[in-house]
Amino acid sequence: MREEYDIKDLNPRKNPYTKKLKKQITINIDNDTIEYFKALSAQNGIPYQTLINMYLTDCAEHNIKPQINWA
């Protein structure tokens, strides 16, 4: 076994999943919203954090903007 390896020679291909990596963040979400996603989670058998991520991803992919009324 060699003492040193040149990493570039071992695997020259880039990881195709690097764009799909998730980043852990801290976010404040209302209790009612969390309970809503937890109820959906129980119905569908999908973890609630995954459901929230799926929903936010769908919004980003379809350029859905929130409708805000400050009146």
Image (spheres, grey):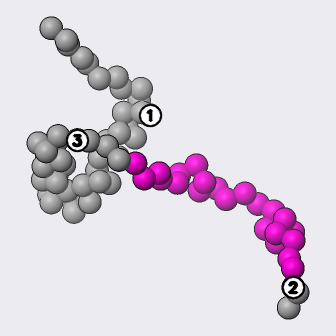
- Identify residue type, mark 3: Ile
Which residue lies at the image location 47% right of the left edge and 53% below the top edge?
A: 22
Q: Residue 12: percent from the left, percent from the top?
A: 81, 62
- Identify residue type, mark 2: Glu
Which residue lies at the image location 15% right of the left edge and 8% below the top edge?
A: 71
Q: Earlier in the sequence, mark 3 or mark 2?
A: 2
Q: Earlier in the sequence, mark 1 or mark 3?
A: 3
Give me the disc on residue 61.
1
Query: Which residue, as the protein is rendered here, is positioned at the far top?
Result: 71
Residue underneath mark 3: 29
Q: Earlier in the sequence, mark 2 or mark 1?
A: 2
Report crowding for label 1: few under 14, some 14 to 19, many 20 or more residues within 10 A (C-alpha). Answer: few
Look at the numbered disc 1 and give the secondary structure of its residue.
helix
Q: Residue 4: percent from the left, percent from the top?
A: 87, 79
Residue underneath mark 2: 3
Between circles 1 and 3, the one closer to the viewer is: 3
Look at the numbered disc 2 and give the secondary structure of its residue.
loop
- Comparing 45 with 28, the one in front is 28
Residue 20 on the magenta span: yes
**Magenta stretch?**
3-25
Report crowding for label 3: few under 14, some 14 to 19, many 20 or more residues within 10 A (C-alpha). Answer: few
Number of marks in the image? Answer: 3
Look at the numbered disc 3 and give the secondary structure of its residue.
loop
Report crowding for label 2: few under 14, some 14 to 19, many 20 or more residues within 10 A (C-alpha). Answer: few
Prevailing secondary structure class for the magenta stretch in the rendered image: loop
Which quadrant: the N terminus?
A: bottom right
